[in-house]
């Protein structure tokens, strides 16, 4: 299990959990060249680690 | 405005969280704040176009790590304290119309690993004494968002229902030298009539003392206190038994069964709780396909539940809908 923690625009944290081979799916939008989300919620990578 | 007010009559804290009145209520499926943010779509809570499982701080928390000072002054009779704690939302799946029962057992296994991680991280916070993981499912329970999700409350104290279970467990252990939940699970397994399902590590049963017609408890067969005490194989077997119970619930009336699901684990306040025992409790509000069990005068005002059904009969109904669980995909952690 891996987790990637980001900080949302209002200061709250959000954690993406990924598992085994399904991991690349989590960021599929960005990897597929999709437009980035228009955040209210700008994401900023803070932490990436295996657990 | 958020604070904890002491109820001297019951000896327990009550949280006020007036900002929660403004929380999102039943948005249309196209504007679900828990779905991924689709390219060109409106921004949801999750600023990426896909995810597997996600945890985030609740936008409308009852408790927060850095709470404001209470808006009212405490008195000797009425202590008040800041509403310190953490409220998280756990997204089970990016699939808006899914439910935990409809997710594959692999996804439930992942959820158990996420629960374990959150228990560890939140429980390590110095101001957190108890990590409470739960799900409210269905409009009958009062959910405001249909997307499959659960919640976590990290309390700055041990909540009263847990405190009472701890005291009962402590007393039982002092008198008998045995674990109360081990004894309950043992009695249910000997009797068999109320057992719904079991595997090598867990047993699910409608307890002898069920308050709700379809109340189910899942107890570990090994004496342990929290998800963090489980082996990898035990976590897999917990996923299997959860899947069995959830599917049986949905098959019972051929509808998406509403419930409250709560995990009871040891406190994280640094105390010794070797006498306590991990378990999960389900409180479904339905007593028939179309009738609700209301918490009325006796239940709410006196704390005495009246169950209009027999646990033995309800367990047999659920047991008839239990099906084997098949692992399809990768399930490594």
Image: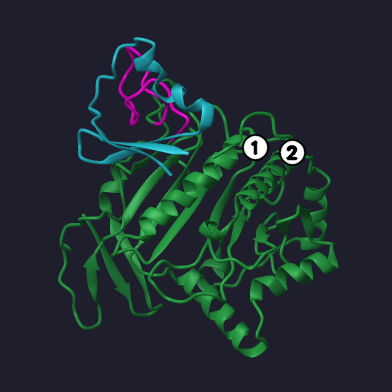
Chain colours: A cyan, B green
Left or right of residue B99, residue B76 in this image: left
Which circle marks residue B105 in the picture? Answer: 1
Q: Which residue is drawn at 28% across and 16% down?
A: A36
Tell me if residue B276 is in the magenta stretch.
no
The quarter of the image holding the N terminus of chain B is: bottom left
Q: In which quarter of the image is residue B296?
A: bottom right
Number of other residues with Cα within 10 Å of mark 2, as a class: few under 14, some 14 to 19, many 20 or more:
some
Which circle marks residue B255 in the picture? Answer: none
Callout 2 touching callout 1 (CB < 8 Å): yes
In the figure, B123 relative to B332: above or below? Answer: below
Q: Which residue is drawn at 65% across and 64% down?
A: B211
Left or right of residue B143, residue A39 in this image: left
Q: Position of residue B104 (x, y in %)?
A: 64, 33
In the figure, B272 relative to A38: above or below? Answer: below
Which circle marks residue B325 in the picture? Answer: 2
In the figure, B72 relative to B320: above or below? Answer: below
Res B303 seen here = yes
Q: Which residue is drawn at 56% across and 52% down?
A: B261
């Amino acid at each position: 299990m891996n987790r990637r923690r980001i900080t949302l625009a209002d200061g709250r944290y959000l954690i993406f959990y990924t598992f085994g081979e399904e991991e690349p799916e989590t960021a599929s939008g960005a990897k597929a060249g999709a437009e980035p989300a228009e955040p209210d919620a700008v994401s900023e990578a803070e932490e990436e680690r295996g657990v | 405005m958020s604070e904890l007010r002491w109820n001297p009559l019951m000896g327990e804290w009550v949280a006020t969280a007036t900002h929660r009145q403004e929380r999102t209520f039943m948005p249309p499926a196209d504007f679900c704040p828990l779905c991924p943010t689709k390219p060109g779509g409106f921004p949801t809570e999750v600023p990426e176009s896909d995810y597997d499982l996600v945890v985030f701080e609740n936008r409308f928390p009852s408790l927060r790590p850095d709470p404001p000072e209470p808006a009212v002054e405490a008195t000797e009779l009425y202590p008040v304290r800041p509403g310190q704690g953490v409220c998280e939302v756990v997204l089970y799946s990016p699939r808006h119309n899914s439910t935990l029962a409809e997710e594959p057992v692999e996804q439930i296994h992942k959820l158990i690993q996420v629960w374990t991680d959150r228990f560890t991280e939140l429980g390590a916070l110095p101001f957190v004494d108890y990590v409470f993981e739960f799900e409210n499912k269905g409009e009958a329970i009062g959910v405001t968002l249909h997307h499959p999700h659960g919640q976590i409350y990290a309390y700055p104290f041990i909540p009263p229902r847990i405190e009472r279970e701890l005291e009962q467990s402590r007393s039982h252990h002092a008198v008998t030298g045995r674990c109360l939940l081990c004894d309950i699970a043992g009695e249910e397994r000997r009797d068999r009539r109320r057992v719904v399902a079991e595997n090598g590590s867990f047993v699910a049963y409608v307890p002898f003392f069920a308050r709700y017609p379809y109340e189910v408890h899942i107890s570990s067969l090994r004496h342990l206190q929290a998800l963090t005490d489980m082996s990898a194989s035990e976590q897999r077997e917990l996923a299997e038994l959860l899947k069995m119970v959830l599917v049986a619930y949905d098959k019972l009336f051929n509808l998406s069964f509403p419930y409250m699901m709560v995990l009871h684990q040891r406190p994280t306040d640094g105390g010794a709780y070797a006498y306590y025992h991990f378990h999960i409790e389900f409180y479904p509000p339905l007593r028939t396909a179309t009738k609700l069990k209301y918490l009325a005068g006796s239940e709410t005002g006196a704390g005495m539940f009246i169950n209009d059904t027999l646990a033995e009969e309800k367990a047999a109904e659920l047991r008839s809908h239990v099906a084997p669980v098949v692992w399809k995909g990768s399930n490594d952690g």
